[in-house]
Amino acid sequence: MHDVNNHLERNECLLGLDLGSKTIGVAVSDPALIVASPLQTIRRTKFTKDAEILFTLVKDRQAGGLILGLPVGMDGTEGPRCQSTRQFAANLLEIRDVAIAFWDERLSTAAVERFLVGEADMTRKRRSQVIDKMAAAYILQSALDAIAR
């Protein structure tokens, strides 16, 4: 985690990603690496197109690195979804050198879902529109909090 932080230039931020099979939730930090904010949800198509969108965001947001949520099992084991996430990162690195770190995302979507239902009182339709980018923000915020410690 601190590796990504060490690669950042002045005023660069981080992007957080919540990789799903159909979407990629994206969040962005402020340059001070204090606050994560939901940015957008990318509807997945082909890897090259998804990567193009991500690298455009990296450039436009002046991001110095990516934090990818790693869907570790509740027992701490890594299954097929973790392998898929690690492969996604490896494929990104084949296209362009970018600092990447993984963050244990256990229960992130469940925590965001509870918030959206309980605190925000959102409808199911509205939740489905924001859950992925909110989960990405939750993942990124957890990573930022760890960096600050």
Image (cartoon, rainbow, N blue to C red):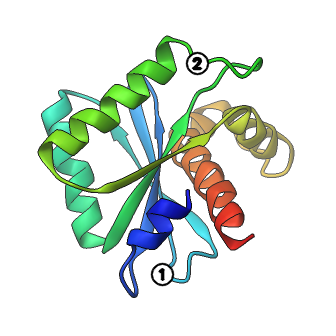
| Three-letter amino acid code at the position of disc 1 | Pro
Percent across and percent down for residue 86 are 40, 30
Q: Residue at x 64, y 67 (%)?
A: 147
Residue at (77% x, 39% y) in the render: 111
Q: Which residue is mark 2?
A: 78
Q: Secondary structure at mark 2?
A: loop
Seen from the viewer's position, the closer of residues 116 and 24 is: 24
Quadrant for residue 2, please give it: bottom right
First reached walking from the N terminus: tag 1 or tag 2: 1
Locate residue 99, reporting x and y percent.
35, 57
* Left or right placement of residue 34 versus residue 64 in this view: right
Who's the residue at 40% across and 32% down the image?
A: 23
Near-viewer residue (25 or 140): 140
Q: Residue furthest top?
A: 80
| Residue 100, placed above or below residue 35 | above
The three-letter amino acid code for the residue at tag 2 is Glu
Image height of 115 relative to 145, above or below: above
Above or below residue 104? Residue 59 is below
- Which circle, 1 or 2, is nearer the viewer? 2
Q: Which mark is residue 31?
A: 1
**If the image is split into quadrants, where does the C terminus sit?**
bottom right
Q: Is residue 31 above or below residue 92?
A: below
Q: Secondary structure at mark 1?
A: loop
Asked whether, in this view, residue 121 is left or right of residue 29, the answer is right
* Residue 51: % across, % down: 21, 43
- In the figure, residue 95 lies in which quadrant? top left
The mark found on residue 144 in the picture is none
Tell me the quadrant of the picture where the N terminus can be found: bottom right
